Every structure is written in structure tokens, then in C-alpha cells.
Image (tube, helix red, strand yellow):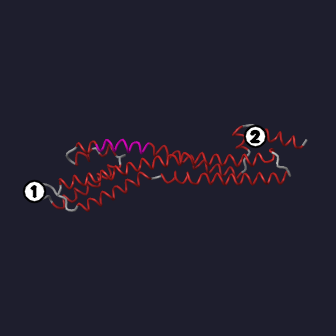
Amino acid sequence: MPWSTTALAQTTAFSGGMGGLLSDVGWVARVVLLVVLVLSLVSWAIIIYKFVVLRRAHSQSDTFLQVFRKSSKFSEVNSVCVQLRGSPLVGVFQAGYLEVNQQVRATGGNPAQGKPTVKSLDSLSRSLIRAATVEGTRLERRLSFLATTASVSPFVGLFGTVWGIMDAFGDIGRAGSANLVVVAPGISEALITTAMGLLAAIPAAVFFNLFSSRIKVLNSMVDDFALEFLNIVERNFT
């Protein structure tokens, strides 16, 4: 019987699990799955990279603060900066340290008080703010791709879903029947693209929020350190 032959063919095609399903999807669904796969792979690469970078940034920032608060000279702190490059505090400190040195050399110190002095705390503050902005931008680098994947992947999968349903309706029209054997390929194709879109979007959204929270903490540390640095300079160089 024709119906039995078709049913047997469909049963054979969909009896191979996920591999069998993927082998029978149309070219549009394959393009959708390829796009989602690329987004997912790049997202996971960024997730692993940012996890390592932010973890190192937190650890080295704590170490840097300990060194900074124990040292009595900026030159001593500057000597350990090479080993703590992963901390955003290092970039802010070096910008402030450079500005202080330039101002001290420009004024030649204060002979009356017998100590080096800075000419403008406003210039120093601007240098610290500029460095903090650079460090914040560095921490947020590549994070926007996770946000893009989280927001775009479900819609890419939804496109495949709509296309699969259209195929299912086309199969119904050609077969003149709405039985399960006729609609199964199109519906399966639609569900696969939907699932893959969500599998790409969910991790990207979760880790984007997690990393954003960690970066917010680091930015707060940077702002607090800039104020602390400015206070020390004001007490000792004015």
C-alpha cells in the first residue's frame, strides 16, 4: 500500500535519533542551524576567555590593593605592576603615577616645604578618570557579542520554526492529508531549529549577566581606588 510504504520510509528516517533528524532537514533549516552553531561556538569561546580574564582581574586587584596600601612609595608599587597587568587598577595607578611624576618634574618641588608638589589635582583627576574609562572598556570587550547572541539566536531559530511549519503545510497540501506521517518532517525541522536557537541563547544570556555583574564590581573598585589615590596625592604632594 502507498501509505504503508510512506510510513515505513518516514519511520526509517526518524528512527535514528538526533542524527536522523538532522540528516533530513531542509537547506533553509541547515543554514539556520549553521548560523546558530557559529553563534554558539563563538559565544562559548568568549565565555571561557572572559571567565579566565575576569577571575584573574579580581585576584590581581586584591593583590595590588594589598601592595599599594602597604607600600610607602609609589615607585615601590610601580615595580610590581608588571606582574599584575590583569588588574584594571594597575592601568589607573600607572596613569596617575605618570601624571604625578610629570607635575613634580614641572614644578621642581617646593623648596620652602622641602618636598615634591603637584601643580593641579584637577589634571590628575582627569587622568585617573580617563584611565578608568579605558580599563572599563577593556573589561567589557567582546561582551556585546554575548548580548547579541542571547537576543538574536531565538529569532534565528524562530525563522527556522516558521519555515518548518510552512513546509509542513506544503506537505499537507501535496498529500491531501494531515496525518502524522505527512506533517512530521516539517514539524520536526521546526522544533529542532527552535531548540538549537534556545540552546545558543540561554548560556549567552546567563553569562552575559554574570560577567556584567563582575565587571560592575571591578568598575566600583577602580572608582574607589582612583579616589584613594587622589586623596594620598593631596595629602603628600600639596
* Residue name at image x 82 percent, y 41 percent: 9
Residue 111 point in image, percent of width and height? 9, 58
Using the image as rendered, state which of residue 45 and residue 159 is in the foreground: 159
Q: Secondary structure at mark 1?
A: loop
* Residue 125 horizontal/vertical position (percent): 28, 59
Q: Seen from this angle, which residue lies furthest left?
A: 112
Q: Residue beneath label 1, please?
A: 113
Left or right: 123 in relation to 162: left
Picture residue at 71% right of the left edge, 38% below the top? 17
Residue 121 vertical position relative to residue 44 in the rendered view, above or below: below
Give how far apart the Cα atoms at labels 1 and 2 are: 88 Å
Q: Which residues make up the magenta segment?
A: 52-65
Q: Is the stretch drawn in magenta largely helix, strand or loop?
A: helix
Per the rendering, the mark at residue 14 is 2
Please state the horizontal and vertical placement of residue 52, each as a whole percent of the image. 44, 42
* Quadrant in the picture for residue 155: bottom right
Q: Residues within 10 Å of mark 2 (few under 14, many from 20)?
A: some
Category of crowding for the residue at label 1, using alpha-carbon neighbours closer than 10 angstroms: few (below 14), some (14–19), many (at least 20): few
Asked if residue 55 is among those painted magenta in the image, a careful observer would answer yes
Which kind of residue does numbered mark 2 sit on?
Answer: Phe
Residue 189: give its label: none
Q: As shown in the figure, which amino acid type bears the numbered disc 1? A: Gln
Q: Is residue 9 left or right of residue 159?
A: right
Q: Position of residue 7 (x, y in %)?
A: 83, 41
